[in-house]
Image (cartoon, rainbow, N blue to C red):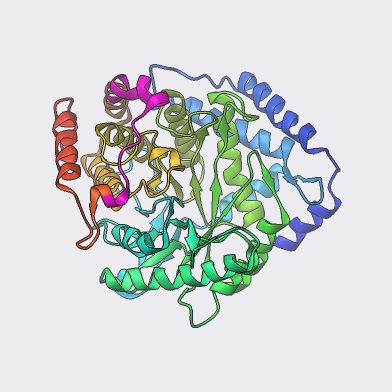
């Protein structure tokens, strides 16, 4: 659809209070769960029911048509017909490229049990770091051997001042951010490497627009993620980004994080809402690729049984019924340089890759503890993802592996170890993991080999 037709609907659609819309999301998802017989199976953290994945897709279509998308600024609901949605899905691109020259990489739609390797886009998912560490952390992700693109952390301060949204310093932080991105990819020896989210230090549209001006360093072969507001909401700030990006030529991605335990409901309802968010991305954000991170409302991770089930059911629903390039991000409860984080990232990566997703690794320590991130976690995810695809692991074997690892760490999630900061587990000068971190990874691979997953 034309973006301005969508905007007209946000201006002319039915008025609704936000809490009324929230309740409509919850009640509609709950009704459709029953109608389409969507049922979480605790014995299948990797969904094994392909017919249910198809019903989940149909439920998400019904949900999207009934509920629509809510704009916080106009307090109106924008709705679409099923025919309009089908037209958009049928015409959506199956692949999108990032980067230039020999560093150009293509993100493609993947199928269930797909033998093609996942697209890998390492990043610390906006984990805040201090200014003097920013480039080191950023380059640790750019140097991941299997990285197709990369992105960076956010800033605690710039020039000794806290970076706050909507301030003049946010504009400066955005300009500083894109210059560091360009510096990191050159220093890593990959000058043409794409950045899938070229600004991680700013949120407002004016700051993002400023960062794209020459000579700061962004390229149209870089991308920007536009995040929906949970659940099924947008605002003018996000819509202004769409208006700009459609003209600028940068690669538009949609970012979706429905909350298990919030208005989305339980795992079945949240799976419906997650798939529907991809429709929001197509219709409203005009996104050509899609990144999701469903998380637990209280635990702020997506590595427990229910989150893995809803993620895999949703991934299979999208893989089997659309051609969308879909990516997902692991939010781990444990922090870096712990045995637990390796088991968490392994379960998430195995489950996601066999279900049709590419990967956007990752957020350690619930994504809320400064400087607890490094390229090591992302590198492990990429290696695991390529191994899963290369071995052609079927869903049933992936389910067995994931269940085995879950039995060892799932009960620890509420009190997961915080782990170590970047400077405690990485050699800052050489940008290599510490001996301890390397040893923990080797021990993890040995542990996995004993239950049939050999890297």
Q: Nearer the viewer, residue 339 or 289?
A: 339
**Magenta stretch: dominant secondary structure:** helix
Percent from the top left, x then y, of residue 220? Answer: 49, 73
Residue located at (44% from left, 33% from top): 302
Q: Does 416 lie within the magenta span?
A: yes
Q: Which residues are magenta?
A: 405-423
Where is 179 relative to 125, above or below? below
Residue 356 horizontal side relative to residue 255, left or right: left
Where is 319 relative to 250, above or below? above
Percent from the top left, x then y, of residue 449? Answer: 15, 31
Q: Nearer the viewer, residue 361 or 323?
A: 361
Q: Residue furthest bottom?
A: 215
Quarter of the image where one finds residue 143: bottom left
Where is 6 relative to 301, above or below? below
Q: Does 305 lie within the magenta span?
A: no
- State whether residue 340 appears in this view: yes
């Amino acid at each position: 659809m034309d973006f301005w037709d969508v905007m007209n609907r946000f201006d002319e659609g039915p008025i609704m209070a936000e809490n009324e819309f929230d309740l409509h999301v919850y009640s509609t998802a709950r009704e459709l769960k029953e109608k389409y017989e969507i049922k979480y199976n605790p014995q299948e953290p990797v969904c094994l029911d392909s017919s249910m994945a198809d019903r989940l897709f149909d439920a998400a279509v019904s949900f999207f048509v009934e509920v629509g998308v809510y704009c916080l600024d106009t307090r109106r609901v924008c709705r679409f017909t099923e025919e309009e949605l089908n037209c958009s899905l049928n015409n959506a691109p199956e692949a999108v490229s990032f980067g230039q020259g020999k560093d150009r990489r293509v993100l493609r739609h993947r199928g269930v049990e797909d033998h093609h390797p996942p697209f890998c886009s390492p990043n610390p998912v906006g984990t805040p770091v201090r200014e003097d560490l920013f480039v080191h952390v950023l380059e640790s992700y750019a140097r991941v051997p299997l990285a197709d693109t990369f992105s960076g952390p956010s800033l605690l301060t710039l020039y000794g001042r806290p970076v706050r949204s909507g301030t003049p310093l946010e504009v400066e932080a955005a300009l500083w951010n894109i210059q560091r991105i360009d510096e990191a990819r050159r220093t890593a020896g990959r000058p043409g490497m794409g950045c899938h989210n070229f600004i991680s230090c700013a949120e407002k549209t004016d700051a993002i627009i400023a960062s794209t001006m020459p000579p700061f360093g962004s390229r149209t072969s870089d991308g920007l993620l536009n995040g929906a507001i949970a659940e099924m909401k947008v605002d003018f700030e996000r819509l202004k980004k769409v208006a700009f990006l459609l003209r600028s030529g940068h690669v538009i991605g949609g970012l979706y994080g429905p909350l298990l335990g919030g208005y989305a409901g339980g795992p079945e309802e949240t799976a419906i809402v997650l798939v529907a968010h991809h429709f929001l991305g197509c219709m409203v954000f005009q996104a050509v690729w899609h990144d999701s991170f469903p998380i637990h409302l209280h635990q702020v991770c997506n590595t427990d049984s229910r989150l893995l089930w809803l993620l895999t059911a949703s991934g299979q629903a999208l893989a089997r019924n659309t051609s969308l390039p879909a990516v997902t991000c692991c939010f781990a409860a444990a922090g870096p340089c712990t045995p637990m984080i390796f088991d968490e990232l392994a379960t998430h990566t195995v489950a996601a890759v066999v279900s049709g997703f590419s990967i956007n690794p990752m957020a350690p320590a619930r994504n809320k503890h400064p400087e607890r991130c490094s390229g090591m976690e992302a590198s492990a995810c990429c290696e695991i993802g390529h191994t899963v695809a290369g071995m052609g692991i079927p869903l049933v074997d992936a389910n067995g592996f994931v269940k085995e690892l879950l039995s060892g760490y799932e009960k620890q999630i509420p009190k997961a170890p915080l782990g170590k900061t970047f400077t405690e587990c990485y050699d800052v000068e050489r940008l290599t993991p510490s001996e301890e971190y390397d040893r923990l990874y080797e021990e993890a691979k040995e542990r996995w080999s004993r239950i049939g997953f050999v890297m």
